[in-house]
Amino acid sequence: MTAADDKNDLRIYIQDARDALLWKLEGLSEYDLRRPLTPTGTNLLGLVKHVTGAEALYFGDTFGRPFPEPAPVWITGQTEPNGDLWARADESTKEVVGRYRRVWAHSDATIEALPLDAVGKVPFGARHEQTLHRVLVHMIAETHRHVGHADLVRELVDGATGQRSDGANTAPGDTDWWRAHHDRVERAAREAGGLA
């Protein structure tokens, strides 16, 4: 396998994560895109906003290729804690998603322009110097982690599951099948926990 093949494989995985994250937003109201469904406020549009900032930083500033638009305040530290994990009412979905798409185009240009062993400087943390390969692996893991969060939030919103809108990677089953499956899992948990 060549370095070009390695880079292409990594690009496929990061794009797969990006696409999965955005499909989680499809067909939902502004309220459902933004509503917090965990005690810590996790919401779909906020996850996109967070990953946008992470990509802009890791593939931009780290390699001396800053994203050409003004840095979002969550990158510059000019917002409250978790300010990158939710969208204000005056931040449109179109704006948040559009910025994400522009950031990933900028990231892809960095990935294309540099070899995997190119070294960049992350502006925080103990391990400042990182190769493009390491940053790509980190952002693949980071994005897929947040896709997992989005999976759960979307399921809580309207029951939609899976990595893609066609549901091809989830077990087939109608509402009754899933209810029975849920009940079976609950019974096993109760039995294992001595609650049966």
Image (tube, helix red, strand yellow):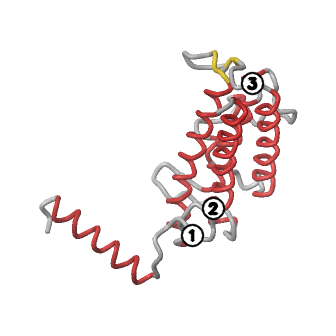
Amino acid type assigned to the residue bearing label 1 in the image: Gly
Of the numbered discs 3 and 2, the one sitting upstream in the chain is: 2
Q: Is mark 2 on a helix, strand or loop?
A: loop
56 sits to left or right of 188 = right
Residue drawn 68% across the image and 31% down it? 2
Amino acid type assigned to the residue bearing label 3 in the image: Pro
Amino acid type assigned to the residue bearing label 2 in the image: Lys
Reading the image, the residue beneath label 3 is 115
Residue drawn 57% across the image and 69% down it? 167
The answer to whether 177 is drawn above or below residue 38 in the figure is below
Reading the image, the residue beneath label 1 is 167
Reading the image, the residue beneath label 2 is 24
Residue drawn 66% across the image and 34% down it? 6
Residue 3 place in picture, x, y as percent = 69, 29
The answer to whether 192 is drawn above or below residue 54 in the figure is below
Residue 93 place in picture, x, y as percent = 75, 57
Residue drawn 69% across the image and 65% down it? 30
Quarter of the image where one finds residue 154 = bottom right
Measured in 3D between alpha carbons, the distance from the residue under mark 2 to the one under mark 1, in whole angstroms, is 12 Å
Please tell me how crowded label 1 is: few (under 14), some (14-19), or many (20+) other residues with Cα within 10 Å: few
Quarter of the image where one finds residue 185 = bottom left
Q: Check if mark 3's residue and mark 1's residue have beta carbons within 8 Å.
A: no
Q: Which residue lies furthest to the front in this view?
A: 1
